[in-house]
Every structure is written in structure tokens, then in C-alpha cells.
Amino acid sequence: MLTLILILIPLVLAAVLLGLRGGAVKRVALIASLVELALAVYVLSIFKADTSSQFSLSYDWISSAGIRFAIGIDGISVLLVLLSTLLVPLIILSTFNHSYRNPSAFYALILMMQSALVGVFVAKDAFLFYFFFEAALIPIYFIAASWGGENRIPVTFKFFIYTIFGSLFMLLGLVYLYLQTPGSHSSLLSAFYELKLSAAQQSVLFWALFIGFAIKMPVFPFHTWQPDTYVESPTPATMLLAGIMLKMGTYGLIRIVLPIVPEGVQEWGLVAVILSVTGIVYGSIIAIQQQDMKRLVAYSSFAHVGLMAAGIFSLTLDGLQGSLIQMLAHGINVVGLFFIIEIIFSRTQSRDLSQLGGITQNSPVLSVFFIIMVLGSVALPLTNGFIGEFLLLKGVFTYNTWIGIVAGTTIIFGAVYMLRMVQKSMFGLQTTATEQFTDLNLNEILVLLPLAVFVFWIGLFPNAFLKLTEPAVAELLRTLK
Amino acid sequence: MLSIISLSLFGILNLFLGFLKSRLILLPATLVFLFVALALLTQEWNQQALYFSDMLRVNNLFVSFSVIVLLTTVLVVGISRNFGDDIEYTHPAEYYSIILFSVTGALMMIGFENLIMLFIGVEILSVAMYVLTGTDKRNLRSNEAALKYFLMGSFATGILLFGLAMIYGATGSFKLGAIATYVQTATQYRSVSPLLYIGLLLLFFGMLFKVSVAPFHFWTPDVYEGAPTIFTAYMSTVVKTAGFAALYKLASIAFASSYGFWAQTLAVLAVLTLLIGNITAAYQISFKRMMAYSSISHAGYLLLAVVAKVPSSQSAILFYSLAYSLATISAFGVLIAVSERKPYEGNPDERYDAFNGLAKTNPLLAFIMTVSMLSLAGIPLTAGFWGKFFIFSAAVQANLTALLVIAVLMSCVGIYYYFRVIIAMYLKPSDNEGVIVSSGFKLTLLFTTVLTLLFGLFPDLVNRFF
């Protein structure tokens, strides 16, 4: 029941928001997301770290077709539920200094998005999963296309069509699997796990499913929608996209691709790993060249997600555990980075590194937070990024040493582009744009402080999080063998 | 069966009501007639019966498809607000009667048990459509469209009739059951008369013309564009539903045993229809023409279910027709309202640009249009998604992999042109003023939108009947 409430709270309050006007909208949205977070924390506190699916619920949805409304939280989804409930209040709070036109629609869409995201992570039925997977796309499309930058219309359009394209192949794959289930058919994921599919079937299905998730993440070479969309979207949408939505792809790999088509993964996993690792190097090299900070972080996100995908396909406990913790860590870091870029942009009207510099002289607090987020991203020990990337790289090394070495360059590249960004924006001489820079106000600190706390919390005490997921991941790997 | 009789009587009654020359009476009267027919129809649920010397079969297939046709007609009549106001030139009573007559034809097409009945149904429906297309009689476009539709339509009907004659020549019967038996035994002993094959193809081609499957689609864009929008909405939904019900019956009952022969042909035509419909739609400037091509493309998806010929094909076609009809009526309804804002080159403005900024001036209409477009594009939360889902499921069951891949790719193209409307409404600035629409009009459209969303969330509301 709690899981259902987690889906419903944002949805119901989104409907309420549509009826409100004026300044109350923001506050109600924030309260809604905080209530959601409080409930998620409560769920987390009574969550038992084992292999079972908890807080489960199963109703008939389309009984004639055997499709059920089945939801539940298990070790694989628990961190992602935390991620999507933790980040949304911060994202909403981060908009308090900015007034978006038509705020009731804006915040209602954010909450609808959250509802769909939670739905994706708790769905236990393949078509319910798909339903939420697509339902998340509609609000984010409208947010990005209505409140985005100048070039937003063609860019978000491309994003929408590109991702739908992938999802439709995934849908075909799921329909095929559904029709393979015995008797009067069932679309429960657990029924899909039981299927005995031939190697040839699995190979085709692997690609049908993988493409859907690969576009969402995105994995090289399906990434061309991503940088433009991130740049043109308003920052809250970028945060939702990079912070939470791309995890739908990585989550889908673990939840759907690995257990359903294990032989397909054996057969094609190497190709997927090579593509992912190519993305790491490719994204990093482009990120180094960028002058636009938002674009730089967009490419860095592309590089990071490549490592997560590689870790998942390494099929090792470390790789999978690393990818789960890294999903949480990356979400936190990337939201922090995009927010700081937004702060800089709102004060200087520029994200261009060549026009920035010396911000630290006027705003030491901002630079401290910026550096914390950057260090988290470059995986410095004691920060959250270190735990994830270390486990991921360990997993990839176990899988294949040479690929591991190439993937390991992410640490070096990451340091290069991230530190270059810090150096060019924070240090050096002040420019005309940054002369009048003011330091953070209370509201901005309230957003960044929890993020910074999580950077260190996960960095210092990763076991609190890893323990939640370990039994479920170990069980998954055992069934794969 | 009673519904067919009552509808024809109501049609005649409507003509007499025309003496009153008042749309205020005709519109509610027509709605009442349709509801009475609907009520009579639902009485026949779960019954099996043959009528008119075994020429018409009443079963659940007949009732379910007929309900969709009647529901669609109710909705179309519900949004028929302006036509007929100009008494001097137009004749509302005749139009409402023609609509009732054409529904009778559609019902006969759905229920036929004898190919002659099919032919009569097709003719009643088609002739009514030719007239309705030309109702805007002072408008050159409307006249051109009616003439074009009539000439090409008659030609297609001729081909259909020729096909029927050949099938009769081969099998000695017009009855579906007798034909099916002949085809089965003849296929078994490999002694199928070539006449049957030729007749089958001609019959199918005639039917495919009516539902605008490529390469028999050339009339569609011009006719859809030229006809008054309200009748475009009517013909693009009712004809398609009835046509595909008939096509499915032919394919699954009469000619089931010669599947190997016609499946290849229809598969090729489905691919062609999907490609031509979707790709051409993407290049349109006029929204109404886009809807014409989109209607062609939907014929392609429906044909996919016919080609699959699995038991679930029937419910897939049914659900798809329902979702498509609801969404199409919403779309044309909003177009009717919007196109009257500002004329463009002497005609109502039916371009995409006419929708610019609609979300600001008429948020409700914009919302209705958005749901309709999402449904046509097959996005989850809407009925259109489940329509595509059931069609794709049927095709997966029949292992039509290549067709499916093309259908998926074309769905993406579809999203492109449907979203152009949404973008125009929400993201483009406009200098247009808002439109004032009557509350009945608004309620009807809201009703279709609610149904689209309801069936999108709970497809079982329809599907549990099968």
C-alpha cells in the first residue's frame, strides 16, 4: 500500500496544483515533495535488506489480457526510489529564486513526472513498467519544450521522437515475451524471468530491449539527442533528465535485460560494454573541449552513464553494486552541478567559460559547494563518486582487463574537464561578467547543503546503502549463472 | 436487426421533420433516434440469429462494431453545430436523414452473411458519402471532391461487383458459409478455380478502396479536404470501422483457407499504406490533409491485424477502430472550431498555423486536441496506445516481424506530424483571437476525450467483452 501511496501523492497533488494560482503554487509543490520524501524515508527505514519484494501490491488491471497492476520495492529499486524522492524537493526548492510563467502547470508537470518515475522503479509488471516509462516522457517533454531556451522546439522534438523510437522496439520485445508465457499469458516480470528462451530468441530480444534503454541513458552511439536537450531545457528539467530519468535506462538493464535474456547478454554483452566504454572516452574528450558549462556537464553525464552500463554488463557483484550506488551518487552530483551552473548563469547571464573567472573572490561559499560537487563527480576518495566508480571499475576489470584500463581513463578525463571548469570559472581574474557576483542566498544554500551532505555521507559510509541492495543483487547474479 | 429497421424508418421520419425547417428539432431528434437504435442493438448482445433469408447475421461481432459506428455517429451529430443554419442553401433534414441511412448501410456491411448484402451495404454507405461530401454546394472544393469521390468510388464499386460475380461463378453461392466450405475443400484438393482467386482479389481491392489503403488511396486527401469538416470526421471514422469489420469477416470467415494466397498481397499493401500514409502526412502544411494521410496510415495498422488473422485480431481491430474514431472526432471537432477563426485564401484556415497559440486562448480545446493527437500517435495513457498494443500483439503472434519493424518506424514518423499540432498550440505565439464554442459542442468533445483517457487507463472496459 505504501508503494501505491508513493505513486499517488505527487499525482494527486499535481491535480491540486493545477487549480492553484500565484505564490502558493511553489510552496504547495515543495510541501508535496517533502511529504513524499518523508514517506520514502519511512519506507526505507522499515525496508528489510533481503531478496524479497516488499510493500507489494497486485491488482487486476487488464484482467482479460493477464496484465496486472503489480508494484513493490526490492533491493534493486530501493535506492532509485530514494533518488527520485530525494532529488525532487531539492529541484523544486532550486526554482524558488526563479519565476516561471504559468507556475501551476510547471510544478504540476514536475510532480507528474515524479509519480511516473517512482512508478517505473516499483513496477513489477512489464507493461506497467512500460506504461510508466512512457508516461514519464510526456511531462518532461512539455516542461522542456515550454520553458526551455531559444532552440527548444526542434531539440525537444528530436528527443521525444528518438526516445519513443527506442521504447517502441522495447514494447515489441515485451509483447513477444508476453506471448511466450504459458497458459492465458501473464506480463508479470517474474513470469518473464521463468521463460525458457532459445539463444537465437534471446539475441534478438536483447537488441530490442537494449535499444530502448540505451537511447534513454544514452549509450554511444544513441546519444545525439542528449547534449542539446540538456542545454536547451530549463535547469529543473535538465536536473530531472540527468538526475533521475537516465537512471530509468540503467535500471531497466538490471531489472529487465539481465534476468530475462541472460544468454543474449552473454552473446552480446561484450558489444554493449565496448559501446559503453567508447561512450566514456568519446564523451570525456568532447567534454574537455566545451566552453558552455551546461554542455560540458551534459557530456560528462554521458561519459559517466557509459561506465554504469559497462559495470552492469560486467555481470559481477561489484559492477552491479557499483552501478546502483553510482546511480544515486551521480544523480546527486549532477543536480548539484546543474544548479550551480544555473546560479552562475542567473547572475552573469553566461555559461561560457571564456567569459567567467574569479567568482570565488566574491562568493567563497558558492565555490566551496561547487568544488564539493566537482570532487564528487571526479570520484575523489571520501566522496560518493569514488565508491561508485571504484566498484564499477573493479567490476569492469574483472570482466576484461583491457576494457577496464580504457574505462579507467574516465577518472583521469573526469578530473581534466571538471577541474578545468572549476579553474576557469572560479579562479583567475574577475571578468566584467563576474565583477558584481553575489554569494549564495539562504535558499540556494538550503538546496546545496543536503546535496553536499549526501556527497560525504555516501562517500564515508557507503555500507549503509550498499547493504540495502546487496542481497537482491547477489540473488540476481546467482540466477544468471 | 431491429436497429437496422428502425434506423431506416427514422431516416424517413427525419425527412418529414424537415418540414419544420428547424435544426433545433432535427438535431435532438436525430440523437434520440440514434440512442433508440443503440438501445435496440444492445438487446441483441450474446444472441445468435440469421435474418432476411440468412442474409444478415447478428452476433457479438455485429453488435460490438455496430455500437462503435452508432457511438461515432452520435458524437458526429453532437458536434454538427453550424451546418444547416443557412436554410436557403442547405437542407439540414436531408443531411441528418442521409446520415441515418448511411449508418444503416454501415450496419449491413458489418452484419452481412451474404455477399449481396455486403454489396448493398457498401452502396448505401458510399452513395450517402458522395452526397455528404458535396453538401457545401457553393464551394468549388466541395463540388470537386464529391465528383472525384463519386467517379472513383463508383469505379471501385464496379470492381467489387465484378469480383462478387466471379466468386459466384467459382463457388456457386454468395453465402459466406458456402464460400468458406468451397474454398476449404478446393484448397485441400488443390482444385481452386482461378476465377475464385481473381474474384477474391477484385473484391478485396474494392473494399480496400473504401477504407483507403494504398495504392487505392488517391481520392482520400482531396475528398477529405474538400468535404465539410463535419462530414470528413464522419466518413473517416464510420467508413473505416464498417469497412474493416467487413474486410475482417471476409478474410477470417469466407477466405480463411486461402490465407496463403491473399496474406502476401495484403502484407505488401499494408507496408505500402504505412509508408505512403505516414511519410506523406509528415510533409503536409494543411492539418486537414495531414489527417487524411494519417487516416490512410491507420488503415495500414488495421490491415496489419487483418493480415495477422489470429483470434485476437478481431478485438484488436475493434479496439483500434474505437480509439481511432474517438480521437479523430475530437481532432476534427477542434478543427471545425479553430478553422473558423480566420479565413485563409477564402476558405476556412485548415493549416497547422491555424492552431498557433490555441493553448492560450482556448486551453480546453487545446487539451482536447492534445489528448486526441497523443491517442492517434499511440502514446500511453490514451486509448490509441492500447489500440496499437493489441494490433502489435496480434502481429507478433503471427510472426510478422518485418511488417512490425516498419510499423514501429512509421509510428515514430506519426509522432512527428501529430506533435506538430501540439507544438503549434502550446509553443507558438499567435495573434488569433479565441473561439467561442457552444456548450453542447464542448461537452461532446470533452466526452470523447474522457473516453479516450478512460480506455487508455482501463482498456478492460472494452476488452472484457471478448
Image (cartoon, rainbow, N blue to C red):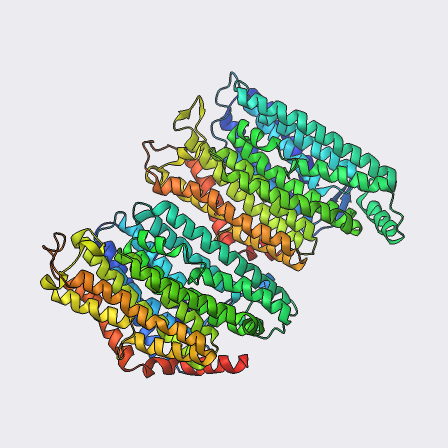
Q: Quadrant of the C terminus of chain A?
A: bottom right
Quarter occupied by residue A296 = bottom left
Q: Is residue A214 left or right of residue A333?
A: right
From this view, report whether residue B30 is shown above or below residue B311: above
From this view, report whether residue A23 is shown above or below residue A80: above
Name the residue nearer the viewer: A143 or B54. A143
Quarter occupied by residue A298 = bottom left
Name the residue nearer the viewer: A286 or A226. A286
Give how far across and how far down residue A232 sits, in percent: 32, 51
**Residue B239, visible in the rendered structure:** yes
Q: Is residue B283 left or right of residue A464?
A: right
Q: Residue at x 71, y 49 (%)?
A: B59
Give how far across and how far down residue A385 sits, in percent: 31, 74
Q: Residue at x 47, y 33 (%)?
A: B286
All told, the count of numbered labels is: 0
Give how far across and how far down residue A417 sits, in percent: 28, 65
Quarter occupied by residue A8 = bottom left
Q: Is residue B206 left or right of residue A364?
A: right
Give how far across and how far down residue B381 sits, in percent: 47, 54
Q: Quadrant of the N terminus of chain A?
A: bottom left
Q: Residue at x 59, y 64 (%)?
A: A204
**Residue A8, visible in the rendered structure:** no
Name the residue nearer the viewer: B106 or A362. A362
State the residue lying farthest toward the top: B88
